[in-house]
Amino acid sequence: MIRGKFRIGNGYDVHALATGLPLWLCGVKVEHEKGCVAHSDGDAPLHALCDALLGALALGDIGKHFPDSSLEYKGIDSKILLARVYDLILARGYHLINCDITIALERPKIGTYIDQMRGAIASILDCDINDISVKATTSEKLGFVGRQEGIASYATVLIGC
Ligand code: MG
């Protein structure tokens, strides 16, 4: 029995970057010479968002629902994973109030993609674009993000019923 009108969740995901792979961020293909190494399409911010939604209702994590050992999920579009996760939320009587996503990457600059990313997520979650925040930050050249070896993403959600 899940009690409470509001529930909060957070998610975190990391993927390594490699030359010659497509870079998918928040459901949008971003022009870059590197992309994420992954079993799926490697969309780290969408994976963080999935984990935040699942976390809000204590439903485990994305790896539990979509194991990377399963061929079914090889190369899968993470927008499909997000839609499936959100179905679990809706089935329990909850809906998104808002979400806030931060993408940590050194390059490329993604400012011109942000509204497209917000729109892609809003369309999957059938909500207003103003309920979806996507932000980007560099890591000031520090650590694996700073060395452009990988990207990290954080997501926070509030859901209500
Ligand atoms: Mg992931």
Image (tube, rainbow, N blue to C red):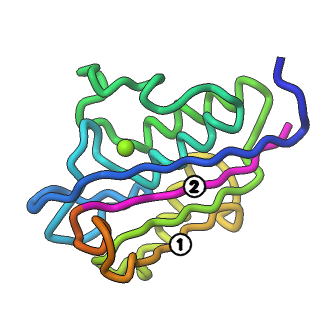
Q: Is residue 22 left or right of residue 131?
A: left
Going by the numbered disc 2, the residue's amino acid type is Ala
Count of marks placed on residues: 2
Disc 2 marks which residue? 155
Q: Residue furthest left?
A: 20
> What residue appears at the point 45 percent right and 58 percent down from the top-left corner?
153
Q: Answer with left or right where residue 22 lies relative to residue 57.
A: left
Mark 1 nearby-residue class (10 Å; few <14, some 14–19, many ≥20): some
Using the image, determine if residue 113 lies above or below residue 54.
Answer: below
Q: Residue at x 41, y 55 (%)?
A: 27
Determine whether 54 is above or below 64 in the image.
below
Q: Position of residue 97 (x, y in %)?
A: 77, 52
Q: Magenta segment range? A: 150-161
Q: Is residue 69 above or below residue 152?
A: above
Mark 2 or mark 1: whose residue is earlier in sequence:
1
Seen at 29% across and 38% down, the residue is: 40
Image quadrant where residue 36 sits: bottom left
Residue placed furthest toward the top = 1
Report the residue at 28% width, 65% height from top.
144
Q: Main secondary structure of the magenta part?
A: strand
Instruction: Give x and y (percent) for residue 132.
Output: 64, 62
In the drawing, what numbered circle is on residue 15? none
For label 1, the SS is strand
**Circle 2 SS class:** strand
Query: Which image quadrant shows ligand 1?
Result: top left
Check disc 1 and give the amino acid type: Lys
Q: Quadrant of residue 112?
A: bottom left
Instruction: Name the one closer to the observer, 7 or 74.
Output: 7
